[in-house]
């Protein structure tokens, strides 16, 4: 059952990424993140329980990681084509596997290492493909933001494995969203104050877009399925992470169709190679 929950989580996550890209046409990243996370907190409010202080401290730490990953990921979406971002994000499960070895003592088989190697080759090919669009991986702010998004996301995934051993999925998801909303609210308050001195450096006016509601619905469903799958008996973080990252198929296909981005054929080949590496890792982990 946990494998199916991870799969449906991946589908919702792929649509969520496309909805974010669409919403960025009307509003900046701050409004989208704050409103979608706030709405998600409202959706989960009926399931909240009080908890103990130590649990809340652990969730606050997770909220910081997630906020850093989301903000940097949204910046990357603004600066890079969605197909480039979605393909690069598929490297995240590889790093989850690597850090699982370092932190949790997990060991990789020869086949798993082969999968890691294939994905890294695909990342290198992605750099060559993106260069045709005038995207340099050296000194590129979008690429730097994407790297930050990937590694803070990896840290959050590893932390999930720790905290879900002692907390219920609804507790983790609900309170984490509340803390993320509070952090984003504080950031936006600072930006609002800064806009009084320099309007160009502050917040852009909010232009309501119903896509924000869709974003909240998709991420709430995707995360709920993810937390419950990871919480299940016998669930493996490495396998769940790989399945969840298959959301790139949905993101890539919809992104290429809706946003008419360039160099799709070359990126499709890179995506196929990267997914081959993911399949190698998944096959050797089951």
Image: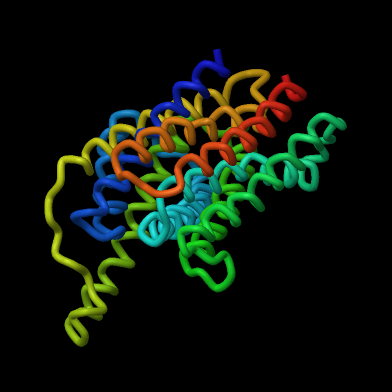
Where in the figure is residue 196, as x and y percent of width and height? 17, 82
Where in the figure is residue 59, as x and y percent of width and height? 50, 47
Question: In percent of the image, x 25 and y 41: which residue is there?
Answer: 39
Q: Nearer the viewer, residue 137 or 156?
A: 137
Question: In percent of the image, x 33 and y 36: which residue is there?
Answer: 257
Q: How is the image coloured?
A: rainbow
Where in the figure is residue 58, as x and y percent of width and height? 55, 49
Q: Tell me: 171 left or right of 43.
A: right
**Which quadrant of the figure contains the C terminus?**
top right
Furthest residue toward top? 1
**Which quadrant of the figure contains the N terminus?**
top right
Q: Quadrant of residue 159?
A: top right
Where in the figure is residue 87, as x and y percent of width and height? 53, 44
Question: In percent of the image, x 40 and y 38: which residue is there?
Answer: 50
Furthest residue toward bottom? 197
Q: Nearer the viewer, residue 231 or 31?
A: 31
Q: Nearer the viewer, residue 85 or 184?
A: 85
Question: In percent of the image, x 56 and y 18: which residue is there?
Answer: 2
Q: Quadrant of residue 183?
A: bottom left
- Residue 6's place in the image compared with 140, above or below, is above
Q: Tell me: 161 left or right of 74.
A: right
- Residue 207's place in the image compared with 279, above or below, is below
Disc tally is: 0
Q: Nearer the viewer, residue 220 or 60?
A: 220
């Amino acid at each position: 059952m946990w494998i199916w929950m991870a799969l449906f989580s991946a589908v919702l996550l792929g649509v969520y990424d496309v909805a974010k890209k669409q919403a960025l046409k009307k509003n900046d990243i701050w409004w989208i993140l704050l409103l979608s996370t706030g709405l998600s907190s409202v959706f989960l409010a009926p399931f909240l329980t009080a908890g103990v202080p130590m649990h809340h401290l652990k969730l606050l730490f997770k909220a910081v990681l997630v906020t850093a990953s989301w903000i940097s990921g949204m910046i990357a979406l603004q600066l890079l084509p969605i197909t480039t971002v979605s393909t690069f994000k598929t490297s995240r499960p590889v790093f989850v596997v690597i850090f699982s070895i370092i932190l949790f003592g997990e060991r990789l088989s020869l086949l798993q290492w082969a999968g890691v190697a294939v994905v890294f080759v695909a990342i290198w090919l992605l750099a060559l493909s993106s260069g045709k669009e005038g995207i340099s991986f050296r000194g590129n702010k979008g690429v730097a933001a994407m790297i930050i998004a990937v590694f803070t996301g990896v840290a959050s995934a590893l932390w999930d494995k720790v905290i879900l051993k002692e907390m219920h999925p609804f507790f983790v998801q609900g309170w984490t969203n509340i803390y993320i909303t509070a952090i984003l609210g504080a950031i936006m308050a600072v930006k609002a104050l800064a806009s009084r001195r320099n309007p160009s450096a502050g917040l852009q006016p909010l232009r309501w877009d119903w896509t924000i509601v869709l974003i909240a619905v998709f991420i709430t469903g995707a995360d709920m399925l993810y937390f419950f799958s990871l919480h299940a008996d016998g669930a493996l973080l490495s396998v769940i992470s790989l399945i969840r990252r298959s959301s790139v198929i949905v993101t890539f296909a919809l992104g290429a169709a809706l946003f008419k981005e360039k160099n799709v054929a070359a990126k499709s080949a890179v995506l196929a190679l990267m997914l081959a590496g993911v399949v190698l890792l998944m096959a050797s982990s089951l």
